[in-house]
Amino acid sequence: MGMSKRAFWSPRSVGGWDLRKEIAVKWLVVMGAGLALCAASHADEQVYRTDHVAVTYSDISEQHAEAIARAVEAARAVAVETFTFDMPETIHVSVRLDQSVRLFNDGQDRFFLTVRAERDLRKPQTTGIFHIYGLCHEIGHLAQYRPIKNRGWMTTAAAEGWAHYVGSRLVDAVYEREGPDLWPDKYDYRADGMARLKRQIAAARRDEADDGAALWMELAEIVGDKGIAPIFKSWGDAKTDPTDPGPTLKKVLLAGRSDKPLKAWWQKAEPVLVAKREKSMFVTKQFGPKDLAGRPVALKYDDGTPSGKSSMAGGGHAVRFKTAAEGWCVTAVAVYGARYGRPEQGDTFQVWLCDADFKPFAELTFPYSVFSDAKWVALPVTPTLVPPEFIVCVGFNPTASKGVFVHYDAAGSGQSLSGLPGKVGRLFERGDWLIRVRVDKCKRPPAAKR
């Protein structure tokens, strides 16, 4: 996925981090120690509260905590009043010191901001970091993520473009409510709102987020500010085919509408905002226990000793396996992992069986509740025929406050990947995921067709 070097939360890389290279919650790769920071408690923490915001902070001034709370409070109010979005009753913002500058959300009601020192909270003319815009950007993500739980179809343009557009709108609205004295190191932050976005859209060189922002701005002009929330809700309620979600999204969008501008908008928007997941041509079949030889074999690359762990938002944990020949079935998948955070009742995760090109031919769903403390978890699979080379991918759709840490060993075999089916997987270089499969030979398997 191509990313511009020009960040819109920070116009230059800050502490090695560029928002468009490591994007918010959907695309953020949250590694063990980093996420633990968000869950840690500190004895010296304080809380600054407004009606709908609680800022937990340490090692920064109350003045900055108040400014953060007021900015989020105002942006939240505009999201509700102007756009009719469903916002959480209380948005919790955690601000702590760390070795880098980061801002991300959990998709529900929490923001996590880390800075290297309080000086990183000074105005962008000094630091190059646009904190007011960043907070408004995260409100935009909540507005989209809360109604649309299944966001696998969203491209970077869809998710980041929306947050870029509505975040810019919210910056202007916050200025109208809070005025020029909101930030302790005061500056005219209107320059970070729609004025900047329009310059970016008009520029000769635009990136994915700019393209998406331009499309969302056009949609708002067609349906009005209050017309977008119902569209997001209807998309969230719809059951889409991950291999081609566009037709369902279009049907829902145009339900009960006949206006030509909206149809024309979708024709332009679909190729930019909607990602298809290419399906495997491998034709599989499921069998009963009596159809198997009864001599199961365990396939693995890991050494069984965890040396690290990872939770990947917007990604998955995958391992490439090989059987001795054709005619083998997967009967179980085992994952060494530990659940963290607060999964909601009914939360599930996916296991995909994919061909050698990482294209899925079978998808299985399991409850989050099978994971607890760090241990091996066996996931039973109805015996499913696989090709001689196949990939198993496990995806938890985690956030900063909910997910599963999958463990890995210290020595990589080159067979572990990170990514999601239908896209090119990236080699995981820190070790082998502790993911194993059990296979058994089919007695008389049908010939797999392509």
Image (cartoon, grey):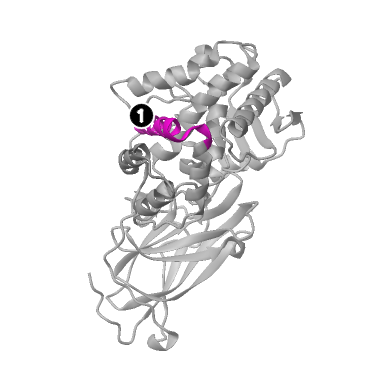
Q: Quadrant of the N terminus?
A: top left
Q: Give the residue drawn at x 57%, y 28%.
A: 135
Residue bearing mark 1: 4
Looking at this rendering, what residue extends furthest in the left direction?
Answer: 450
Q: Quadrant of the C terminus?
A: bottom left
User: Residue 396, position in %: x, y?
Assistant: 51, 55
Between 375 and 400, the one lying in front of the other is: 400
Q: Is residue 213 magenta?
A: yes
User: Residue 40, position in %: x, y?
Assistant: 68, 40
Q: What span is colored magenta in the figure?
A: 208-226
Q: Give the residue drawn at x 56%, y 43%.
A: 107
In the rendered view, tell whether residue 107 sits above or below residue 65: below
User: Residue 228, position in %: x, y?
Assistant: 49, 38
User: Residue 364, position in %: x, y?
Assistant: 46, 66
Asked whether, in this view, residue 139 is left or right of residue 29, the answer is: right
- Residue 240 in which image quadrant: bottom left
In the rendered view, tell whether residue 255 sits above or below residue 61: below
Looking at this rendering, what residue extends furthest in the bottom direction?
Answer: 290
In the rendered view, tell whether residue 218 sits above or below residue 154: above
Q: Secondary structure at mark 1?
A: loop
Between 211 and 13, the one lying in front of the other is: 211
The secondary structure that most of the magenta stretch takes on is: helix
Please name the amino acid that badge 1 sits on: Ser
In the rendered view, tell whether residue 327 sits above or below residue 127: below
Q: Give the residue drawn at x 66%, y 36%.
A: 91
